[in-house]
Amino acid sequence: MISKTTMIKIRNTSSALLAALLFTLGSSAAVYAADISKGANIYATHCTACHGASGVSVMPGTPSFAQNGGLLKPDMTLLATIKSGKNVMPSFQGVLSDRDILDVIAYLRTFN
Ligand code: HEC
């Protein structure tokens, strides 16, 4: 005979599992598998003038990705910043698609 507490435990465990499963399904549907090599090409075209080909900043005030500069933020925050621009950094809205920017962000994360 299963006690009431055990039943509650089982129920809680299964709802936690269900929540985890739904979260995984939900996020895998929303998250696009970034293409790092495409990101590298976009980076070479649009970002190296300030951030440097090897992720070492070549312009004062620009973060060095090779030293983790500017990257300690979630991808979605960086996406918003790259779209809007930040101070000296131009806006990439209308220049790069969200997918392009997510590809670049995945590439930025390979610098260190
Ligand atoms: C004209 C120079 C310039 C170009 C081109 C440029 N950036 Fe930047 N970027 C900057 C500067 C300057 C900052 C620092 C802004 C600040 O914090 O005031 C910055 C900051 C960032 C940050 C950190 C944002 C944060 O929240 O701290 C990221 C990520 C970034 N750039 C990515 C990119 C990517 C990706 C590209 C190419 C698509 C790019 N940048 C092109 C100058 C540039």
Image (spheres, grey):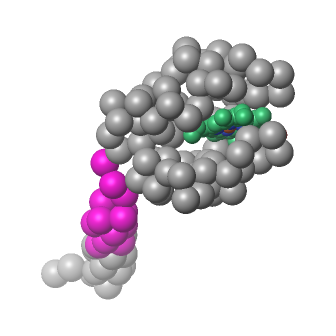
Magenta stretch: residue 32 in it? Answer: yes
- Residue at 83% of width from left, 22% of height from top? 60
Which corner quadrant holds the N terminus? bottom left
Residue 109 visible to the viewer: no
Is 94 colored magenta in this rendering? no
Q: Residue at x 42, y 29 (%)?
A: 40
Left or right side of 64 for 41? left
Identify whether 107 is placed above or below 15: above
- Residue 85 visible in the snapshot: yes
Depth order, front residue of 84/108 = 84
The answer to whether 105 appears left or right of 5 in the picture is: right
Q: Quadrant of residue 41?
A: top left
Q: Position of residue 80 (x, y in %)?
A: 63, 57
Q: Nearer the viewer, residue 87 or 4?
A: 87
Instruction: List the single residue furthest toward the bottom.
Output: 4
Horizontal side of residue 73 vs 111, given as left or right: right
**Residue in the image at 30% along x and 60% along y:** 28
Image location of residue 62, percent across then percent down:
76, 28
Quadrant holding ligand 1? top right
- Depth check, front residue: 93 or 112: 93
Q: Position of residue 17 (x, y in %)?
A: 30, 67
The rendered magenta stretch, by its main secondary structure, is classed as helix
Towards the viewer: 25 or 65: 65
Tally of numbered tags: 0
Q: Look at 45% across and 36% down and name the residue there.
A: 42
Residue 54, above or below 65: above
Residue stretch rendered in magenta on the structure: 17-33
